[in-house]
Amino acid sequence: DGGITQSPKYLFRKEGQNVTLSCEQNLNHDAMYWYRQDPGQGLRLIYYSQIVNDFQKGDIAEGYSVSREKKESFPLTVTSAQKNPTAFYLCASSTYRASNYGYTFGSGTRLTVV
Amino acid sequence: AQSVSQHNHHVILSEAASLELGCNYSYGGTVNLFWYVQYPGQHLQLLLKYFSGDPLVKGIKGFEAEFIKSKFSFNLRKPSVQWSDTAEYFCAVNADGGATNKLIFGTGTLLAVQP
């Protein structure tokens, strides 16, 4: 079945450590996105990429980094510079015309800083 | 800045009651509009979408939404809710005419349906 796989499902990190969240899709979608979901704040865009080797900052990119070396993969690194990293992270993908078709979402990674 | 407002943060209904969840956006140009649902323990799923044509759109599971351009609104409705509709509902807008694929999401509405 085609879809988006996020791993791990749960992740614990010590303060001061970087951590990388994985996102892989086999939908042949051009565009991929990372959102952060916090209670009462909805989904906020961290980074997005419309093609391989290109990505743009979203609304809350500070303290995060991404890469898009392959069409299928869009890993997100939460760096030690992110002040409040504990959250639920969602990856999504879309065809180039997401405005018509919307996104497909992964099942998310819950990151907890301990 | 573009924004999406969902005025109801928590809604509690009894089964068979009618549902209307509000969604307003702040952009005057061409918009594409979406409602997503997140059932407990599941990932976000597309309920319905509007990008042109009939402003009354029908989605899965008996949901519908009406795009009212003059009110900048895209409210979600269902005539009779079921316990299985308990979920969090998100309105989303693509407000740059498709120049990018960015969706801006509202803060979500938690719906609890009591049997």
Image (spheres, coloured by chain):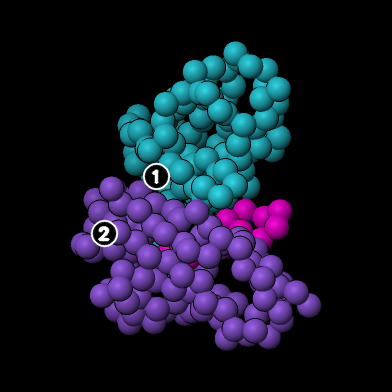
Chain colours: A cyan, B purple
On residue B1, which mark appears? none
Position of residue A23 in the picture relative to residue A13 (left or right): left
The vertical placement of A66 against B12, above or below, is above
For this orientation, the residue located farthest to the top is: A16
Q: Pointer 1: residues within 10 angstroms few (<14), some, or many (20+)?
A: many
Q: Which residues are magenta?
A: B33-46
Towards the viewer: B75 or A73: B75
Which secondary structure, mark 2? Answer: loop
Residue at the spot 21% in from the left edge and 62% down from the top edge = B29
Viewer-side label of 1, 2: 2
Q: Residue shown at 51%/29% (left/top)?
A: A76
Amino acid marked by disc 2: Tyr
Query: Residue B43, can we see it?
Result: yes
Q: Chain of mark 2?
A: B
- Mark 1 touching mark 2, by CB under 8 A? no
- The circle on residue B27 is 2
The residue indicated by pointer 1 is A31
Expressed as whole percent of the image width and height from the top left, the position of residue A30 reads 38, 45
Task: For marks 1 and 2, give the CA distance.
Answer: 23 Å
* Residue B112 location, quadrant: bottom right
Give the side of residue A59 with respect to residue B88, left or right.
left
Q: Amino acid at mark 1?
A: Ala
View extreme (right): residue: B115
Q: Quadrant of the N terminus of chain A?
A: bottom right
